[in-house]
Image (tube, rainbow, N blue to C red):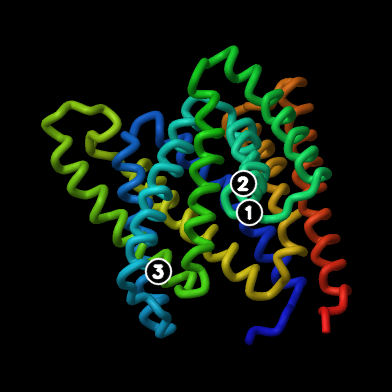
Amino acid sequence: MTQDRPLLGIFLMLGFCVVAPMGDAVAKLLGQSVPLGELLFVRFAIQAVILIPLVWLGRRMWKMRGRVLRLTALRTVLHIFGIGAMFTALQYLPLADAVAIAFVMPFIMLILGKYVLGEEVGSRRLIACIVGFIGTLLVVQPSFAEVGWPALLPLVVAVNFSVFMLVTRQIAKETDPIGLQAVSGVMAVFILGPLLWFSQSAGIAPLEVVEVDNREMVLLAAIGILGTLAHLLMTWSLRFAPSATLAPMQYLEIPVATIIGLIIFSDLPNGLAATGICITIASGLYIVLRERAIARMEAQTPAPV
C-alpha cells in the first residue's frame, strides 16, 4: 500500500488544476477550425497511445469481461458525450463560465446519491446544494442572455459526468484506474472511427474530417496529452493524499480557468457571473468540509458490541 505523502498529493492536484483548464483552452482554440468529431477522435487516440505502454510496463490489470466490460463501454460513451458537450460549450462561453457552471456536478452527485443510491444526506448539505444551484444560475443567466441554449451545455456536462462517476463507482474496485482509461481510450477509437468514416458522405458538419495545418496538428497533440496528463495527475494525487484533503483544492480550477481565459481570450466574467462563481465555490467547499466532519464523527463513534 502506498504511504500517504500529503504534500506530493497536493502538488499533483495543483498540477491537475492547471493542466485541465489548459486542455479546455486548447479545445476552445481548435473548435474554431477543427470539427468536434475529429477533436474527440484524436483526444482519445492519444489517450490510448500514452496509457497502453504504461499499462504494459506496469503490468496493470486491463482485461475485462461480463458486467465490468459492459459498464466500461457505457462509461466510455458517457465520457465521449461529456467531453463533446464541454468542447461545444467552449465555442460559445468564456472559459471561466463554462468551467464554473460544470462545477454544479458535486451538487448533482449528492442528490443522485440520496435519491438513486439511498445515501444519507442531511438538510444542511441539501440547503448547500440549493444555494450552489442558485450560484450556478447566476453564472448561466448572462451567458444565456447572450448566446441562448448553448449556455446550458455545461449543465448537461455536469449531469453526464455525475452519471459517469456513478458508473465508475460500480467498477472502481474491480479495475485499475490507468488500465480502465487505456481500455476506454481504445473503445472510444473503435466507436468514433467508424462513426467518422460513415459520416463523411452524410454532410454532418461536426463529424467531418478536415486537413489540419502544422499549428492545428500541434494543438491536436496537446489536447490529447493535456487530457491524459490531467487524468494521471488526478489519479496519482489520490495515491499520496486523502480525498478529503484534495477535494477542496479542485475548486482552484475555476480561478485558474479565469486567468487562462483572460490571458488567451481576453474573457472575464461580468459582475453577476463572478458573484455566482463565488457562491458556487463557497457552497461546494461547505459540502466538502461537511462531508469531512461527518466522516470524522463516524470514525470516532465506537462500533456497537
Residue 239, by quadrant, is bottom right
Q: Name which residue type carries label 1.
A: Gly
Of the 4 image quadrants, the one containing the N terminus is bottom right
Describe the element under mark 3 as helix, strand or loop. helix
Q: Is residue 151 placed above or below 294 in the rendered structure?
A: above
Looking at the figure, which quarter contains the C terminus? bottom right
- Amino acid at circle 3: Leu
In this rendering, position of residue 254 left or right of residue 185 = right
Q: Quadrant of residue 291?
A: bottom right
Q: Quadrant of residue 58?
A: bottom left
Q: Decide which of 30, 269 is in the foreground and name it.
A: 269
Say few, some or many: other residues with alpha carbon within 10 Å of mark 2 (under 14 / 14 to 19 / 20 or more): few
What is the residue that sits farthest to the left in this orientation? 201
The residue carrying mark 3 is 51
Q: Earlier in the sequence, mark 3 or mark 2?
A: 3
Side of 43 relative to 189 (left or right): right
Q: Which mark is residue 118?
A: 1
In this rendering, the answer to whether 205 lies above or below 41 is above
Place of residue 62 in the rendered image (x, y in percent of width and height, measured from the top left): 37, 75
Apparent side of residue 242 relative to residue 169 in the rendered image (left or right): right
Camera-near label (3 vs 2) is 2
Q: Residue at x 62, y 48 (%)?
A: 109
Distance from the alpha carbon under mark 2 to that under mark 1: 5 Å
Task: Where is residue 100? Give x, y as percent.
Answer: 65, 36
Of helix, strand and loop, which one carries label 1?
loop
Mark sitting earlier along the chain (3/1)? 3
Q: Amino acid at mark 2?
A: Tyr
